[in-house]
Amino acid sequence: MSSPSAADHSTPLIINLAPTGMVPTRAMSPHVPLAPEEVVEDVTRCAALGAAMVHLHARAPDGTPTEDPAIYGRMIGALRAAAPDLVVVTSTSGRLVREVEKRAASLFLEGDLRPDMASLTLGSMNFATTASVNEPQTIIRLAQLMQERGIKPELEVFDLGMVNFAKILIDKGLLEPPYYFNILLGNPGTAQATLMHLAAIVADLPPQSYWSLAGLGRFQARATALGVVMGHGVRIGLEDNLWLDQERTVLATNAQYVQRIVAQAQAMGRPVATPRAVRTMLGLAQRG
Protein backbone atom coordinates (compact mmCIF):
# COMPACT_ATOMS: atom_id res chain seq x y z
CA MET A 1 0.00 0.00 0.00
CA SER A 2 1.85 3.09 -1.22
CA SER A 3 -0.70 5.90 -1.19
CA PRO A 4 -3.81 7.03 0.70
CA SER A 5 -5.93 7.36 -2.44
CA ALA A 6 -9.50 6.11 -2.66
CA ALA A 7 -10.01 2.41 -2.08
CA ASP A 8 -11.29 0.30 -4.96
CA HIS A 9 -14.40 -1.82 -4.61
CA SER A 10 -12.43 -5.01 -4.08
CA THR A 11 -10.95 -3.60 -0.86
CA PRO A 12 -12.86 -4.92 2.17
CA LEU A 13 -14.76 -2.13 3.92
CA ILE A 14 -13.87 -1.53 7.58
CA ILE A 15 -16.92 -0.85 9.76
CA ASN A 16 -15.87 0.93 12.96
CA LEU A 17 -18.71 1.16 15.48
CA ALA A 18 -18.91 4.13 17.89
CA PRO A 19 -21.82 3.00 20.05
CA THR A 20 -21.94 5.44 22.97
CA GLY A 21 -19.69 8.50 22.95
CA MET A 22 -19.61 11.10 25.71
CA VAL A 23 -22.68 13.19 24.95
CA PRO A 24 -25.76 10.98 24.32
CA THR A 25 -27.99 10.26 27.31
CA ARG A 26 -30.93 7.99 27.95
CA ALA A 27 -33.16 11.06 27.87
CA MET A 28 -31.99 11.75 24.32
CA SER A 29 -32.54 8.18 23.14
CA PRO A 30 -33.57 4.92 24.82
CA HIS A 31 -31.24 3.07 22.45
CA VAL A 32 -27.91 4.46 23.71
CA PRO A 33 -25.97 1.73 25.56
CA LEU A 34 -24.47 3.14 28.75
CA ALA A 35 -23.77 0.43 31.34
CA PRO A 36 -20.92 -1.96 30.47
CA GLU A 37 -23.34 -4.86 30.05
CA GLU A 38 -25.49 -2.81 27.68
CA VAL A 39 -22.47 -1.79 25.62
CA VAL A 40 -21.22 -5.37 25.37
CA GLU A 41 -24.64 -6.69 24.33
CA ASP A 42 -25.08 -3.98 21.70
CA VAL A 43 -21.55 -4.27 20.33
CA THR A 44 -21.76 -8.06 20.16
CA ARG A 45 -24.97 -7.78 18.15
CA CYS A 46 -23.33 -5.29 15.78
CA ALA A 47 -20.22 -7.44 15.41
CA ALA A 48 -22.40 -10.30 14.23
CA LEU A 49 -23.89 -7.95 11.64
CA GLY A 50 -20.54 -6.79 10.26
CA ALA A 51 -18.78 -4.35 12.59
CA ALA A 52 -15.07 -5.21 12.80
CA MET A 53 -13.93 -2.50 15.22
CA VAL A 54 -15.46 -0.78 18.23
CA HIS A 55 -14.55 2.69 19.52
CA LEU A 56 -15.41 2.52 23.22
CA HIS A 57 -16.27 5.25 25.70
CA ALA A 58 -16.89 4.34 29.33
CA ARG A 59 -19.75 5.60 31.48
CA ALA A 60 -19.99 5.69 35.27
CA PRO A 61 -22.99 4.08 37.02
CA ASP A 62 -24.80 7.44 36.92
CA GLY A 63 -24.35 7.59 33.13
CA THR A 64 -21.70 10.31 33.06
CA PRO A 65 -18.47 9.86 31.08
CA THR A 66 -15.54 8.34 32.95
CA GLU A 67 -11.95 7.33 32.29
CA ASP A 68 -12.15 4.58 34.95
CA PRO A 69 -9.98 1.71 33.65
CA ALA A 70 -11.99 -0.81 35.66
CA ILE A 71 -15.09 -0.02 33.61
CA TYR A 72 -13.11 -0.23 30.37
CA GLY A 73 -11.71 -3.53 31.59
CA ARG A 74 -15.19 -4.95 32.24
CA MET A 75 -16.27 -4.09 28.71
CA ILE A 76 -13.11 -5.36 27.04
CA GLY A 77 -13.07 -8.60 29.01
CA ALA A 78 -16.66 -9.39 28.09
CA LEU A 79 -16.08 -8.46 24.44
CA ARG A 80 -13.01 -10.70 24.24
CA ALA A 81 -15.25 -13.59 25.34
CA ALA A 82 -18.20 -12.72 23.10
CA ALA A 83 -16.39 -11.54 19.95
CA PRO A 84 -12.74 -12.60 20.31
CA ASP A 85 -11.42 -11.16 17.03
CA LEU A 86 -13.12 -7.77 17.32
CA VAL A 87 -10.66 -4.85 17.21
CA VAL A 88 -11.15 -2.92 20.46
CA VAL A 89 -10.35 0.80 20.63
CA THR A 90 -10.55 2.90 23.80
CA SER A 91 -10.99 6.66 23.94
CA THR A 92 -8.40 9.13 25.25
CA SER A 93 -10.64 12.12 24.51
CA GLY A 94 -9.82 15.61 25.74
CA ARG A 95 -13.38 16.81 25.56
CA LEU A 96 -13.96 16.72 29.33
CA VAL A 97 -10.56 15.87 30.82
CA ARG A 98 -7.19 17.43 30.06
CA GLU A 99 -4.85 15.52 32.39
CA VAL A 100 -2.80 13.00 30.44
CA GLU A 101 -2.77 10.50 33.31
CA LYS A 102 -6.57 10.30 33.41
CA ARG A 103 -6.96 10.22 29.64
CA ALA A 104 -4.39 7.43 29.34
CA ALA A 105 -5.79 5.23 32.11
CA SER A 106 -7.16 2.53 29.78
CA LEU A 107 -3.75 2.15 28.13
CA PHE A 108 -2.40 0.48 31.26
CA LEU A 109 -4.82 -2.43 31.30
CA GLU A 110 -2.94 -5.72 31.16
CA GLY A 111 -3.22 -9.02 29.31
CA ASP A 112 -6.39 -9.62 27.34
CA LEU A 113 -7.87 -6.42 28.75
CA ARG A 114 -5.33 -4.23 26.98
CA PRO A 115 -6.99 -2.50 24.01
CA ASP A 116 -5.76 -3.14 20.48
CA MET A 117 -5.93 0.56 19.65
CA ALA A 118 -6.70 3.89 21.31
CA SER A 119 -7.98 7.15 19.92
CA LEU A 120 -5.52 9.98 19.39
CA THR A 121 -7.07 13.30 18.41
CA LEU A 122 -4.45 15.32 16.57
CA GLY A 123 -5.43 18.84 17.59
CA SER A 124 -7.80 21.06 19.54
CA MET A 125 -11.20 22.12 18.25
CA ASN A 126 -14.52 23.69 19.11
CA PHE A 127 -17.69 21.62 19.04
CA ALA A 128 -21.11 23.30 18.96
CA THR A 129 -21.06 24.21 22.66
CA THR A 130 -17.80 22.80 24.07
CA ALA A 131 -14.13 22.47 23.18
CA SER A 132 -11.79 19.50 22.98
CA VAL A 133 -8.36 20.66 24.12
CA ASN A 134 -5.38 18.69 22.88
CA GLU A 135 -2.14 20.56 23.49
CA PRO A 136 0.87 19.48 21.42
CA GLN A 137 2.72 18.01 24.39
CA THR A 138 -0.40 16.10 25.43
CA ILE A 139 -0.74 14.54 21.98
CA ILE A 140 2.96 13.66 21.94
CA ARG A 141 2.81 12.10 25.40
CA LEU A 142 -0.26 10.03 24.56
CA ALA A 143 1.47 8.82 21.38
CA GLN A 144 4.54 7.89 23.42
CA LEU A 145 2.46 5.91 25.90
CA MET A 146 0.64 4.08 23.12
CA GLN A 147 3.93 3.18 21.49
CA GLU A 148 5.38 1.97 24.80
CA ARG A 149 2.31 -0.15 25.47
CA GLY A 150 2.11 -1.62 21.96
CA ILE A 151 -1.26 0.01 21.29
CA LYS A 152 -1.88 1.35 17.79
CA PRO A 153 -3.29 4.89 17.58
CA GLU A 154 -6.64 5.47 15.96
CA LEU A 155 -5.73 8.84 14.45
CA GLU A 156 -8.68 11.22 14.66
CA VAL A 157 -8.68 14.05 12.12
CA PHE A 158 -11.26 16.83 12.13
CA ASP A 159 -9.33 19.29 9.96
CA LEU A 160 -6.43 19.49 7.52
CA GLY A 161 -3.92 20.78 10.05
CA MET A 162 -4.36 17.63 12.11
CA VAL A 163 -2.92 15.59 9.23
CA ASN A 164 0.18 17.73 9.43
CA PHE A 165 0.49 16.97 13.13
CA ALA A 166 0.38 13.26 12.31
CA LYS A 167 3.38 13.86 10.07
CA ILE A 168 5.15 15.58 12.96
CA LEU A 169 4.57 12.47 15.07
CA ILE A 170 5.87 10.30 12.23
CA ASP A 171 9.02 12.44 12.02
CA LYS A 172 9.49 11.96 15.77
CA GLY A 173 9.26 8.20 15.32
CA LEU A 174 6.05 7.96 17.35
CA LEU A 175 3.80 6.50 14.64
CA GLU A 176 4.48 3.39 12.61
CA PRO A 177 2.79 2.34 9.37
CA PRO A 178 0.28 1.31 8.36
CA TYR A 179 -1.59 4.29 9.77
CA TYR A 180 -5.31 4.29 10.50
CA PHE A 181 -7.13 7.62 10.23
CA ASN A 182 -10.70 8.46 11.18
CA ILE A 183 -11.75 11.55 9.23
CA LEU A 184 -14.69 13.21 10.99
CA LEU A 185 -16.67 15.76 8.98
CA GLY A 186 -19.52 18.15 9.71
CA ASN A 187 -18.49 19.63 13.05
CA PRO A 188 -19.29 23.39 13.06
CA GLY A 189 -15.72 24.49 13.77
CA THR A 190 -13.76 22.09 11.57
CA ALA A 191 -13.88 20.43 8.13
CA GLN A 192 -17.30 20.14 6.54
CA ALA A 193 -18.92 17.16 4.82
CA THR A 194 -18.03 18.30 1.31
CA LEU A 195 -15.98 16.67 -1.41
CA MET A 196 -13.60 19.63 -1.42
CA HIS A 197 -12.79 19.36 2.28
CA LEU A 198 -12.52 15.58 2.12
CA ALA A 199 -10.30 15.67 -0.97
CA ALA A 200 -7.89 18.12 0.66
CA ILE A 201 -7.53 15.93 3.74
CA VAL A 202 -7.16 12.64 1.87
CA ALA A 203 -4.64 14.12 -0.57
CA ASP A 204 -2.41 15.10 2.34
CA LEU A 205 -2.46 11.79 4.21
CA PRO A 206 0.93 10.08 4.46
CA PRO A 207 1.68 6.98 2.39
CA GLN A 208 0.61 3.64 3.87
CA SER A 209 -2.57 5.14 5.32
CA TYR A 210 -5.98 3.59 5.68
CA TRP A 211 -8.81 6.05 6.20
CA SER A 212 -12.36 5.74 7.44
CA LEU A 213 -15.00 8.41 7.18
CA ALA A 214 -17.52 9.67 9.74
CA GLY A 215 -20.09 12.44 9.73
CA LEU A 216 -21.41 14.24 12.77
CA GLY A 217 -25.14 14.74 13.30
CA ARG A 218 -27.14 15.20 10.12
CA PHE A 219 -23.97 14.74 8.05
CA GLN A 220 -23.50 11.13 9.11
CA ALA A 221 -25.44 9.54 6.24
CA ARG A 222 -23.69 11.69 3.63
CA ALA A 223 -20.21 11.06 5.00
CA THR A 224 -20.60 7.33 5.52
CA ALA A 225 -22.02 6.91 2.02
CA LEU A 226 -18.87 8.59 0.70
CA GLY A 227 -16.85 6.26 2.89
CA VAL A 228 -18.49 3.21 1.36
CA VAL A 229 -17.82 4.55 -2.15
CA MET A 230 -14.30 5.94 -1.71
CA GLY A 231 -12.78 5.09 1.65
CA HIS A 232 -11.21 2.13 3.33
CA GLY A 233 -13.95 2.23 5.93
CA VAL A 234 -16.62 4.10 7.83
CA ARG A 235 -17.20 5.02 11.43
CA ILE A 236 -20.86 4.68 12.37
CA GLY A 237 -22.89 4.79 15.56
CA LEU A 238 -24.96 6.68 18.10
CA GLU A 239 -21.92 8.60 19.31
CA ASP A 240 -22.13 10.64 16.11
CA ASN A 241 -25.87 10.76 15.38
CA LEU A 242 -29.00 9.59 17.18
CA TRP A 243 -31.40 9.82 14.25
CA LEU A 244 -31.99 7.28 11.50
CA ASP A 245 -33.56 9.77 9.10
CA GLN A 246 -32.68 13.30 8.01
CA GLU A 247 -36.03 14.62 9.28
CA ARG A 248 -35.18 13.42 12.80
CA THR A 249 -38.39 11.49 13.29
CA VAL A 250 -36.93 8.02 13.98
CA LEU A 251 -34.35 7.32 16.68
CA ALA A 252 -31.74 4.90 15.40
CA THR A 253 -30.10 1.86 16.92
CA ASN A 254 -26.48 0.94 16.39
CA ALA A 255 -27.58 -2.29 14.72
CA GLN A 256 -29.66 -0.37 12.19
CA TYR A 257 -26.66 1.76 11.32
CA VAL A 258 -24.43 -1.27 10.75
CA GLN A 259 -27.12 -2.95 8.66
CA ARG A 260 -27.44 0.18 6.51
CA ILE A 261 -23.70 0.26 5.78
CA VAL A 262 -23.57 -3.46 5.02
CA ALA A 263 -26.50 -3.08 2.61
CA GLN A 264 -24.79 -0.17 0.84
CA ALA A 265 -21.58 -2.17 0.49
CA GLN A 266 -23.45 -5.20 -0.81
CA ALA A 267 -25.32 -3.08 -3.35
CA MET A 268 -21.95 -1.99 -4.72
CA GLY A 269 -20.49 -5.48 -4.66
CA ARG A 270 -18.00 -4.48 -2.00
CA PRO A 271 -16.95 -7.00 0.67
CA VAL A 272 -17.17 -6.09 4.35
CA ALA A 273 -13.95 -6.59 6.28
CA THR A 274 -13.89 -9.21 9.01
CA PRO A 275 -12.06 -8.43 12.25
CA ARG A 276 -9.28 -10.81 11.22
CA ALA A 277 -8.93 -9.00 7.90
CA VAL A 278 -8.74 -5.64 9.68
CA ARG A 279 -6.04 -6.98 11.97
CA THR A 280 -4.03 -8.01 8.92
CA MET A 281 -4.59 -4.67 7.18
CA LEU A 282 -3.52 -2.62 10.20
CA GLY A 283 -0.69 -4.86 11.36
CA LEU A 284 -2.42 -5.89 14.59
CA ALA A 285 -1.81 -9.22 16.27
CA GLN A 286 -4.35 -11.91 15.52
CA ARG A 287 -6.28 -13.36 18.44
CA GLY A 288 -7.05 -17.01 18.99
Image (cartoon, rainbow, N blue to C red):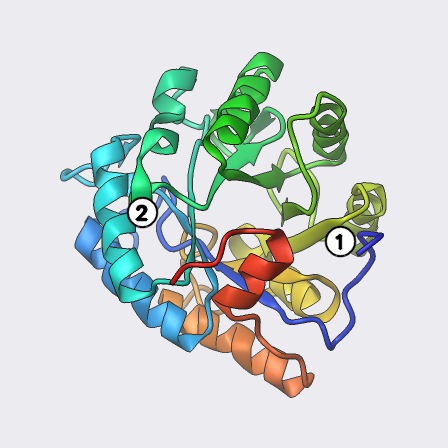
Q: Is residue 203 left or right of residue 70?
A: right
Given residues 227 and 191, the one toward you in this image is 227
Which residue is drawn at the image coordinates 28% and 41% (left, top)?
A: 72
Q: Can you give x and y, in whole percent of width and height, for residue 47 in the image? A: 39, 69
Which residue is drawn at the image coordinates 64% and 59% (left, top)?
A: 223
Tag of residue 194:
1
Q: Can you give x and y, in whole percent of width and height, for residue 15 in the image? A: 53, 64
Q: Is residue 227 left or right of residue 93?
A: right
Is disc 1 placed on a helix, strand or loop?
A: loop
Q: Is residue 273 left or right of residue 176?
A: left
Given residues 148 and 232, the one toward you in this image is 148
Amino acid type for the residue under numbered disc 1: Thr
Is disc 2 placed on a helix, strand or loop?
A: helix
Q: Earlier in the sequence, mark 2 or mark 1?
A: 2
Which residue is drawn at the image coordinates 21% and 50% (left, top)?
A: 36
Amino acid type for the residue under numbered disc 2: Asp
Contact between marks 2 and 1 (CB within 8 A): the answer is no
Compute the Cα span from label 2 to label 1.
40 Å
In this rendering, the answer to whether 236 lies above or below 120 is below
In this rendering, the answer to whether 236 lies above or below 139 is below
In the picture, the quarter occupied by the N terminus is bottom right
Label 1: few (<14), some (14–19) or many (≥20) C-alpha neighbours in 10 Å: some
Q: In this figure, which residue is indicated by the disc labeled 2? A: 112
- Count of marks overlaid on the render: 2
Disc 2 vs disc 1: which is toward the camera?
2
Q: Is residue 135 left or right of residue 111?
A: right
Q: Can you give x and y, in whole percent of width and height, for residue 154 in the image? A: 56, 42
